[in-house]
Amino acid sequence: MSFSWIFGEDLALDLGTSNTLIYSNKKDGKIIEPSVVAVDLNNYEIVAVGEKAKSMEGKTPDNIITLAPIKGGKIINFEIAQVMLTNLFKKAKSSFSIFNPKVYITISSGISEVDKRAIEDCVIYSGARSVEFIATAVASAVGMGLPVLEPSGSIVVNIGGGTVDVSLVSLGGVVASKFVDIGGDSIDYDIVNIVKNKYDLMIDKETAEYIKINLASFITSNITNNLSIFGRDINSGMPRNAIIYGKDITSSLFPLFNAVTDAIKVILEKTPPSMTGNILRNGIFLTGGCSKINGCVEYLENEIGIAVNVVENPLTCTCEGASKLINKIKIKNNRRKNNE
Ligand SMILES: Nc1ncnc2c1ncn2[C@@H]1O[C@H](COP(=O)(O)OP(=O)(O)OP(=O)(O)O)[C@@H](O)[C@H]1O
């Protein structure tokens, strides 16, 4: 008789700059929460984690601060990351499991051994029984339904909140990769500056993200689009609204997408000739939240001259892929045990 349902719980963890995703193999429930924690400075108590903490950003009294413990794929605040993960693991874990879960963490190509060790320690201190790493690109490729185990070669581009990971994946592993620690957050900060300089209006990062999601576009026919937003006049200090035009925001997209273009070119140069045919035939594959930016596919296709495909579920694709991989690993291990 197998007791794996009691102690065999596995979690897939995608620890992102903007969002943390956890999928359990025992529950249908999936945790998708912003990587944010709110702390009361009077007593250092945790006020909120995830969505609730994110909704407090920019609206807290002096004694409460919101903190984002992950940046560029690394833990920048160990204690806060631990609090966040402990809280999210509790939500994700099946109540029937007696033992702590084994956690499979997706990890970007450019993360150093020291940073990997910090992530491992943090996840263990947060209640994991043990930890294993899965390459983000491999998990994303599985989430996209690409034939990762075949020797054909696929280029997977993940553009997140704080990182860009471009990897050539083949035979279940990463053949070549380029990592850049810039992401959608950088667009938000650029939008804050553009709105300040062009509209004399101070806005917070959350409003800038709203503008990015709802207005920013590479498509020139969209640049007459506009959005009404509220902020504080930099001269009078008084609140007022402004109509922001898409054409003024487009420049905020170039630093990130030029970095993406350069990274893709590096990987194309490193791609073995035997794999180029497949890549030219099938194109490259885009995932991560910033692949939702309007017109980015056309922009990248124009820059690199290769077809670009965007996955339907760019925010969840990597964790979904990791979860599927865990099941494959389990099935393989069970088969091996049965044959022994
Ligand atoms: N519809 C959208 N349009 C434009 N940008 C979006 C959209 N939805 C999400 N984003 C942006 O995507 C980013 C978050 O993406 P994602 O969740 O893939 O990153 P992450 O995994 O948290 O970060 P990273 O992997 O870089 O550490 C944020 O910058 C967010 O503003």
Image (cartoon, rainbow, N blue to C red):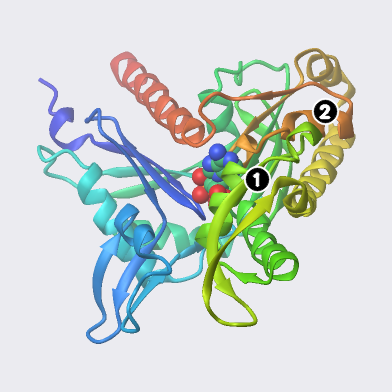
Q: Secondary structure at mark 2?
A: helix
Front residue of this view, candidates 226 and 149? 226
Q: Residue at x 14, y 23 (%)?
A: 2
Single out the mark in the foreground, 1 or 2. Answer: 1
Quadrant of the image occupied by residue 334:
top left
Front residue of this view, candidates 245 and 102? 245
Task: Answer above or below: position of 157 versus 205.
Answer: above
Q: Quadrant of the N terminus?
A: top left
Neighbor class of circle 1 (other Cα within 10 Å; few <14, some 14-19, many 20+) is some
Residue 199 horizontal side relative to residue 90, left or right: right
Front residue of this view, candidates 293 and 330? 293
Residue 45 horizontal side relative to residue 169, left or right: left
Query: What's the distance in space between the residues labelled 1 and 2, CA to CA?
Result: 26 Å
Looking at the picture, how far across and down is residue 28, in whole percent? 25, 28
Neighbor class of circle 2 (other Cα within 10 Å; few <14, some 14-19, many 20+) is some
Q: Dot 2 corresponds to which residue?
A: 301
Q: Dot 1 corresponds to which residue?
A: 226
Number of residue marks: 2
Q: Which mark is residue 16?
A: none
Looking at the picture, how far across and down is residue 200, in whole percent? 68, 71
Q: Secondary structure at mark 1?
A: strand
Task: Answer above or below: position of 183 versus 8.
Answer: below
Amino acid under label 1?
Answer: Asn
Amino acid under label 2?
Answer: Glu
Q: Residue at x 59, y 58 (%)?
A: 72
